[in-house]
Image (cartoon, rainbow, N blue to C red):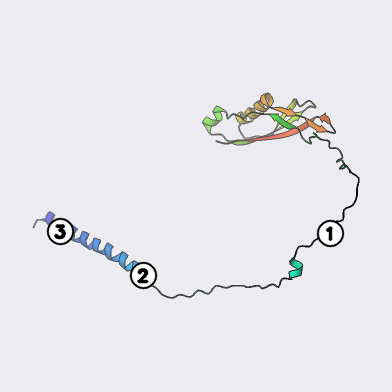
Amino acid sequence: MSANQYRQWIAIIISIVFHILLAIIPIQMSKEIISHEKKEFKVPVNIVIKEIDPVASLPRQEKTVKQKTKHRTLPKKRGLLPGDRKLPVISQSIPIPYPKSAINNEWEGKVTIAVKLNSMGKITKITLIKSSGYKVLDDMLINVVSEHYRFKPKRIMGKNKAGLLQISHTFKL
C-alpha cells in the first residue's frame, strides 16, 4: 500500500467515525430533553377579598326638577367673538423642497423661524430662531415662506391685529 492510499483510508475511517458521532450525539441530547421529571414550582399568589356593598354599587338616580326658565343666551367670553384668532393662521402653503446640494451632502436638520405679520396678514419680517446648522436649509425655508405662504392675521374683537407666528420644519432624508 502506498502512502497516498494509506492517507485516503485513514481519512475515510475518520469520516465514518465522525458521522457516527454526529448521529449518536443528537439522539442522546433528545433523550435528556424529553425526560419527564416532576418539578414543582411554587408561585406566590396574593389574594385580596373585598366586600362590596350592593346598595352603594348601584347607580344613583337623581330626581330632576323642571323649572320654567326664560330662554337665555350664553354669556360671551370676554375678548372673543366668532371668527377671532389668538394667533395668525397659515392660509396657503406649499411643501418645502429639499435643496439639491443638501441631498448630495446628506445634510439634515430642523429650522425654526419667526414670521412677523401686519394687520393685513402680509409678512413684515422673518427672523431665524434656530438654525439647522446649514445655511442652504435655513435659506430654503425662509425663501419658500416669504414667497409662497399666505397668512390670515390675528383677530381680536373682530379687528385684525399684527402678530407673530413661529414655523418649524425638519429636513430629513
Q: Which residue is mark 1?
A: 63
Mark 2 or mark 1, which has the lower sequence index? 2
Q: CA distance from mark 2 to mark 3?
A: 35 Å
| Residue 116 percent coordinates (x, y) | 75, 29
Front-lying residue, 146 or 127? 146
Which of the marked residues, 3 or 1, is nearer the chain's N terminus?
3
The alpha-carbon separation of the residues under discs 3 and 1 comes to 103 Å
Identify the amino acid type marked 2.
Answer: Glu
> Mark 3 falls on what kind of element?
helix
Helix, strand or loop at label 2? It is: helix
Q: Find numbered disc 1 in the image and state the secondary structure of the residue it sits on.
A: loop
User: Quick check: 10 above or below 51?
Assistant: above
Decide: is 68 above or below 103.
below
**Quadrant including the N terminus:** bottom left
Residue type pointed to by label 3: Trp
At 31% across and 66% down in the image, what residue appears?
Answer: 27
Q: CA distance from mark 2 to mark 1?
A: 73 Å
Picture residue at 24% right of the left edge, 61% below the top: 19
Residue at 76% across, 68% down: 56
Question: Residue 145: x, y in percent?
Answer: 67, 28
Task: Check the image and name the residue furthest to the left.
Answer: 1
Q: Quadrant of residue 31?
A: bottom left
According to the picture, the residue beneath numbered tag 3 turns out to be 9
Determine which quarter of the picture holds residue 147. top right
Within 10 Å of disc 3 (Cα), the crowding (few <14, some 14-19, many 20+) is: few
Along the line of sight, the residue nearer the viewer: 119 or 1: 119
Q: Which residue carries the number 2 mark?
A: 32
